[in-house]
Image (cartoon, helix red, strand yellow):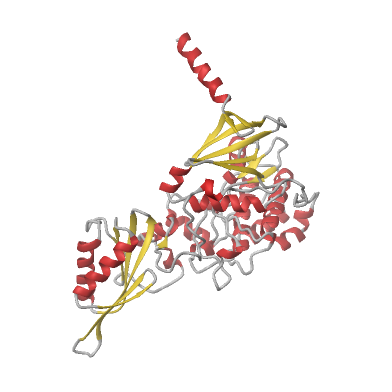
Amino acid sequence: MVRIRQEEEKKVEVKKGMRLGKYELGRTLGEGNFGKVKFARDTVSGQSFAVKIIDKSRIADLNFSLQIKREIRTLKMLKHPNIVRLHEVLASKTKINMVMELVTGGELFDRIVSNGKLTETDGRKMFQQLIDGISYCHSKGVFHRDLKLENVLLDAKGHIKITDFGLSALPQHFRDDGLLHTTCGSPNYVAPEVLANRGYDGAASDIWSCGVILYVILTGCLPFDDRNLAVLYQKICKGDPPIPRWLSPGARTMIKRMLDPNPVTRITVVGIKASEWFKHEYVPSIPDDDDDEEEVDTDDDAFSVQELGSEEGKGSDSPTIINAFQLIGMSSFLDLSGFFEQENVSERRIRFTSNSSAKDLLEKIETTVTEMGYNVQKKHAKLKVKQEERNQKGQIGLSVTAEVFEIKPSLNVVELRKSYGDSCLYRQLYERLLKDVGTSSPEQEIVT
């Protein structure tokens, strides 16, 4: 046993001696889906850092390269005392190494779980720093979109540091309507308008998430919670969480106005900073934009991860990429559209999966429906399928739109939407496509 322990200690010493440029790597601080976070020391200045080491093959396989690049590009813009600082990016053929500010106090989530709610005085100080950081982000055109206790770190002095900008949005991600449309975030913290899937304002949705964080800081529990996602989303869309009477009137008002389910009437950053409750003993954080620190840069050739493009920059024939929220919404008993629309679509929309690539899938669908006598119009990743024969009432037999949604490169969802026409023809079309291009068995198909 002694011998084995000595050998293990030698291995640890070897690991501590690993070098990354001018940085000496030490113990592992944490592990995630894409790699590890290690302690590092600058051998020249002696300063301590955290290095996020990302395995390129893992992010390429999981289609997350865009998320990593987005986080790097966003953090390059942000220099604020309440936001984790990115100092340098070093890349090789197999790894991406993000040299970041070392934050030693852990997650705010762990702080609340271990010690419970904060006093209103201490909670307000943290909330003031949170709003300062988010206000700065918004001034730079950055919208976080995944604010939660786990993404708020604490430094050695108890000051907050906002982290994890992998789901953040920039001005180029807005559509022509001036809104964001990607459904993302964490269930307990996501704003109701994000769930509505009709476009949302990034600033207003961030304010909602900050309101959830404030609620947890001051009460020690979540304002909206349920094991059943459908019930949870109903609570979020309704708003009106239970607010303890022992909170001060100012705190109760702030929570109520931040968790307003209507984004139009929800309080803004300006309104928050103007409130007397917020201004009590408020010491503004000063951005570090004027620092003379060298600009962070990345070597795209060394990075060499496939660029997936912005939300609006995909090729015209690329399939729509869907995320977990949208996938959940594909299940009939969790269809969020029912919270906002009364139309019954139970017989008009059918979905099934396929392992074919999106391009091959569209070609197979086009071939199959053409063989069945349908006319096809192709537009982007959609096919408009029409049966021109008329029935006894003089109506067109069937009109269907087929669209492909990409979950990951090896898995796509085909959605058929009937505009009008004969239900029997619609079922025949579906069964033929499922046979020719689908991989789901009848028991696995998603029918809504």
Residue at image position (54%, 34%) is 30
Q: Residue 395: x, y in percent? A: 25, 87
* Left-right relation of 226 to 169: left
- Tell me the quarter of the image containing the N terminus: top left
Q: Residue 141: x, y in percent? A: 65, 61
Residue at image position (52%, 17%) is 10
Return the residue nearer the eye: 164 or 191: 164
Return the residue nearer the eye: 274 or 429: 429
Q: How many marks?
A: 0
Residue at image position (50%, 53%) is 66
Q: Residue 396: x, y in percent? A: 25, 85
Q: Residue 194: x, y in percent? A: 52, 62
User: Hey, which quadrant is residue 179 in on the image?
Assistant: bottom right
User: Hey, which quadrant is residue 361 in on the image?
Assistant: bottom left
Location of residue 241 with respect to 296 vertically, above or below: below
- Tell me the quarter of the image containing the C terminus: bottom left
Residue at image position (73%, 36%) is 157
Return the residue nearer the eye: 62 or 332: 62
Residue 404 appearing in the image = yes
* Left-right relation of 431 to 89: left
Residue 186 appearing in the image = no
Name of the residue lying farthest toward the front: 301
Return the residue nearer the eye: 370 or 346: 370
Location of residue 64 with respect to 398 vertically, above or below: above
* Left-right relation of 251 to 240: right
